[in-house]
Amino acid sequence: MRIRHIFISPGHNFVGHHGKPPSENPTLDVREARMLAGRGIEGDRYLDFKDDYKGQVTFFEWEVYERMIEKFSVIGKGAEIFRRNIITEGVDLNSLIGIEFEVQGVRFLGTQESAPCHWMNEVFAEGAEEALKGHGGLRAKILCDGVLRVS
């Protein structure tokens, strides 16, 4: 598995904003990030979100991003638009649901799909939510502390 990008954001833009405009917290593209077991990513909005949270970290496939760009003829929107933390290449993330796996010495447990929501239509393109069903990424728990780096 190759890591193409690591994104963190200090605040929520969509959670709790149903029926209201999103917030404008930045999404930071970092070269490395510290994973904290059972807690989340240092500096990210979901750090210590709640006990035993299934989405301490989220993964998204670069290949899905490229297909979405092509399908919707979108220009000028990077992979950060999907608000997932780790952009991977070369792995089917759905195959990791219910599986413990390791990336760069950090262990994770894939818990479920990171299902797309209606905001995808607003921030990416109309129809994006439907197109991403089954390919929205992976939510995972962090099982040991460590640092991930863009590879």
Image (cartoon, grey):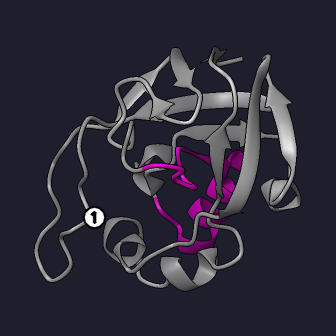
Residue that appears at 71% across and 39% down: 88
Residue 118: name its quadrant: bottom left
State left or right for residue 102 relative to residue 6. Answer: right
Furthest-left residue in view? Answer: 20
**Residue 13 at x, y percent in the picture:** 23, 55
Res. 90 visible in picture: no
**Residue 135 at x, y percent in the picture:** 69, 68
Q: Which residues are magenta?
A: 51-74
Res. 58 visible in picture: yes
Of residues 8 and 146, which is closer to you in this image? 146
Residue that appears at 43% across and 27% down: 29
**Residue 91 at x, y percent in the picture:** 86, 46
Q: Residues within 10 Å of mark 1 (few under 14, many from 20)?
A: few
On screen, residue 83 above or below 119: above
For label 1, the residue is: 15
**Residue 39 at x, y percent in the picture:** 48, 35
Q: Is residue 7 magenta?
A: no
Residue 105: name its quadrant: top right
Residue that appears at 23% across and 43% down: 11
Residue 72: name its quadrant: bottom right
State left or right for residue 94 relative to residue 43. Answer: right
